Amino acid sequence: MKGAQSLPHLGVRRMLQLRLIPIASLFAILPGIAGAGEEGAYQVAFPLSTSGALAIGDMPQVLWGSAWDSPGLQVYGTTAEFYAKTDLGLENRNIANQMRIQIRPKMRPALGREEWHALFGDTLRVVLDLSKMASEARGWSAVYVLETTLNCMIINAARDAHKPRFLGVEIEGKTGYKQFEGTYRLEPAPILEGFDLAEPGWEKRKIPSE
């Protein structure tokens, strides 16, 4: 099983030879969050599995919903299917999706009821649902995939139309992954350096709990 060590980008370079085909699959995940009958193209970072490397892919995807009416839309797109045409045919290369990691908004009380709304002031709050998560996929360990997924979530949160300053992440479904739970600074703005997130990454962006 591959661990969380830095990897050579041989597989990443090979990725450039693939024809990448983004496919949105958020319809069944987030009922009620998207504006009715709306879709749009958004730049989305996601954990991309190639031959020999796990990288951050960054491609336009068609997502169902309005970025203004659905805070966190690009964050939820982090785990949407993403297909690449390879020698073996179409393959889903979003490793978080393959591992069945799901992201949903943290419910916010509003007008005496709870709504699917993730924006709490300047903080975008989401739940990282690991209840169906596999222990590995394509040889990648769950911890390493979660690290890459979290970096992608930070990139996508910083792009949100509401300009949040923080990303709040709550872990649900499995024990042993509480190190990923917490609040993360979105400033300075995340920058992609090749196929990785330039420092500071998720660990240095995490606000220490009191």
Image (cartoon, rainbow, N blue to C red):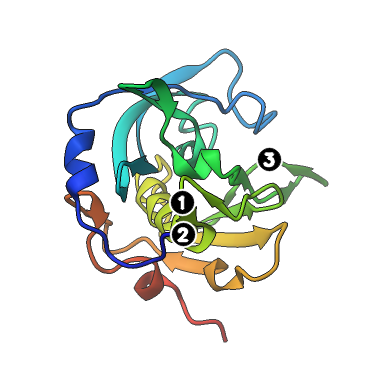
Query: In the structure shown, which secondary structural element does the residue marked by tag 1 occupy?
Result: loop
Pointers 1 and 2 in contact (C-beta within 8 Å): yes
Residue that carries the numbered disc 2 in the rendered image = 1
Q: Residue furthest right?
A: 112
The disc labelled 2 sits on which kind of residue? Met
Residue 191 picture location, percent across and down = 22, 54
- Image point 31% across, 47% down: which residue? 56
Q: Is residue 47 above or below residue 177?
A: above
- Asked whether residue 71 is in view, the answer is no
What is the crowding at mark 3: few (fewer than 14 residues within 10 Å), some, or many (at least 20)? some
Q: Say which residue appears at 49% left-offset and 26% top-offset.
A: 66
Secondary structure beneath label 3 = loop
Judging by the rendered image, the residue that carries numbered circle 3 is 116
Q: Amino acid at mark 3?
A: Trp
Rounded to the nearest angstrom, the CA distance separating label 1 from label 2 is 5 Å
Residue named by callout 1: 139
Q: Quadrant of residue 189?
A: bottom left
Q: Residue at x 38, y 70 (%)?
A: 205
Q: What is the distance, in whole Å, between disc 3 and disc 1 at their CAs?
A: 34 Å
Labels 3 and 1: the sequence-earlier one: 3
Residue at (70%, 68%) from the top-left corner? 175
Left-right relation of 141 to 9:
right
